[in-house]
Image (cartoon, rainbow, N blue to C red):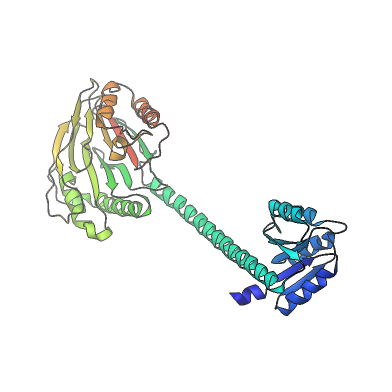
């Protein structure tokens, strides 16, 4: 590192004999030395040769030291070059002004070569370390920019796994919202047709946040796509033998995703709706229970199921059944909604959420959804999300 400092380029700007003396001493020390007899020439050399350090006299023709310092600091090409003022013993005021204007040090005439070289060496060390730090910061910024671009692309991919706007259903209306606490998150949900008579719904919350959790959601979604495409080949205890039962699906995922596979577990609710009869079969793997919401405001929690997914298939899952009536809504959500904290540390909470649903039970689905998140936003008072928030709700209109 010392050799790097000795190979540095130093510009001496002085209109007197001191310029030659300093130039000779510094050349002998191994530095590359540039000389300027006035401020104007010093400015030109700064722009063309970019010195690593400048020794600058105050009193010079054409352009004095203070004026040159001002011009150098205004130009981003030269603003970072350290400047040491050359002053006489009786120029105490010049020292103060120079330091206040941005000079890093001063050297008093007559010069002591030991003091001169020590001060120059110290400032060059600081300068080169600063340059290295700046380059490192630029590299970090570029890497962060690339990471952000990758995260945006990943967020677009994750968004593509959410419900499609092209899924048109004549007797089921669907609304949803997804707010990851980072660019991407560990929540995922969707619905899909199973032949013409059935709809499958799922909502998943993977432990953790960010990229690791999001990658697991992609893997789970791929598995669900496989189950969907091969559903007629699987065992089932639903009313129709072509439909994979929710409990068997959760058990299959529990075996496929033991906790040690990704060092993650997840909660999940999976429901199958018979669009003709309104029968809803479901199983819940330690997820916040879906809610059956009647237009009267009555709530029913759909709690049947079992533990988290990640235990390796060691614990069975149980199913629940309800029959929806025309006008009933079913609400699925992740715990990020009820666990949302405002700026005073208060939780939105299940009680507040349930009360909102009861109050808005008869509201059209788009209005219910919009007002829920307006209420959540007002409650939070712009507090940052600490967990992903997902919300999927559907309205059953009766037999098609």
Q: Is residue 239 visible?
A: no
Q: Is residue 255 left or right of residue 109?
A: left
Q: Residue at x 79, y 53 (%)?
A: 67
Q: Position of residue 182 (x, y in %)?
A: 40, 46
Say above or below: 228 vs 103.
above
Q: Is residue 382 visible?
A: yes
Q: Is residue 218 left or right of residue 325?
A: right
Q: Position of residue 45 (x, y in %)?
A: 79, 65
Q: Residue at x 33, y 52 (%)?
A: 213
Q: Position of residue 272 (x, y in %)?
A: 21, 39
Q: Residue at x 34, y 39 (%)?
A: 389
Residue closer to the observer: 175 or 312: 312
**Hey, which residue is sitting farthest front in the picture?**
90
Say above or below: 70 vs 271.
below
Looking at the rendering, which quadrant does residue 112 occupy? bottom right
Q: Is residue 376 left or right of residue 143?
A: left
Quadrant location of the C terminus in the rendered image: top left
Quadrant location of the N terminus in the rendered image: bottom right
Looking at the rendering, which quadrant does residue 5 occupy? bottom right
Residue closer to the observer: 124 or 155: 124
Task: Report the number of numbered marks.
Answer: 0
Residue closer to the observer: 159 or 56: 56
Q: Position of residue 11 (x, y in %)?
A: 76, 67
């Amino acid at each position: 590192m010392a050799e790097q400092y000795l190979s540095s380029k130093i510009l001496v700007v002085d209109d007197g004999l001191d310029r030659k003396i300093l130039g000779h001493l510094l050349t002998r020390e191994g530095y590359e030395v540039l000389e300027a007899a006035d401020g104007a020439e010093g400015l030109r050399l700064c722009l063309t040769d970019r010195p690593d350090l400048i020794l600058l006299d105050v009193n010079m023709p054409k352009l004095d030291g203070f004026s040159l310092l001002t011009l150098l600091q205004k130009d981003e090409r030269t603003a970072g070059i350290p400047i040491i003022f050359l002053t006489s013993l009786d120029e105490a005021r010049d020292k103060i002004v120079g330091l206040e204007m941005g000079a890093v040090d001063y050297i008093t005439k007559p010069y002591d070569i030991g003091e001169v070289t020590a001060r120059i060496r110290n400032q060059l060390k600081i300068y080169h370390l600063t340059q290295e730090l700046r380059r490192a910061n630029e590299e970090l910024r570029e890497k962060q920019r690339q990471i952000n671009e990758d995260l945006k692309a990943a967020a677009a991919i994750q968004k593509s796994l959410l419900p499609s706007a092209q899924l048109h259903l004549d007797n089921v209306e669907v609304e949803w919202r997804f707010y990851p606490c980072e660019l991407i998150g560990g929540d995922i949900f969707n619905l899909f047709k199973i032949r013409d008579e059935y709809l499958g719904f799922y909502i998943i919350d993977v432990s953790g946040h960010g990229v690791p959790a999001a990658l697991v959601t992609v893997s789970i979604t791929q598995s669900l796509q496989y189950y969907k495409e091969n559903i007629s080949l699987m065992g089932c205890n639903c009313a129709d033998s072509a439909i994979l039962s929710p409990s068997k699906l959760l058990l299959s995922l529990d075996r496929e995703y033991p906790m040690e596979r990704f060092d993650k577990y997840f909660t999940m609710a999976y429901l199958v709706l018979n669009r003709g009869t309104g029968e809803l079969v479901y199983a819940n793997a330690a997820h916040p229970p879906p809610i059956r919401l009647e237009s009267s405001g009555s709530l029913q929690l759909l709690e049947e199921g079992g533990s988290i997914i990640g235990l390796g298939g060691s614990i069975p899952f149980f199913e629940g059944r309800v029959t929806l009536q025309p006008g009933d809504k079913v609400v699925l959500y992740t715990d990020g909604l009820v666990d949302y904290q405002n700026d005073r540390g208060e939780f939105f909470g299940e009680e507040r959420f349930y009360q909102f649903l009861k109050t808005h039970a008869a509201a059209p689905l788009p209005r219910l959804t919009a007002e829920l998140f307006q209420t959540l936003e007002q409650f939070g008072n712009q507090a940052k999300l600490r967990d992903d928030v997902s919300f999927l709700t559907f309205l059953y209109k009766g037999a098609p």
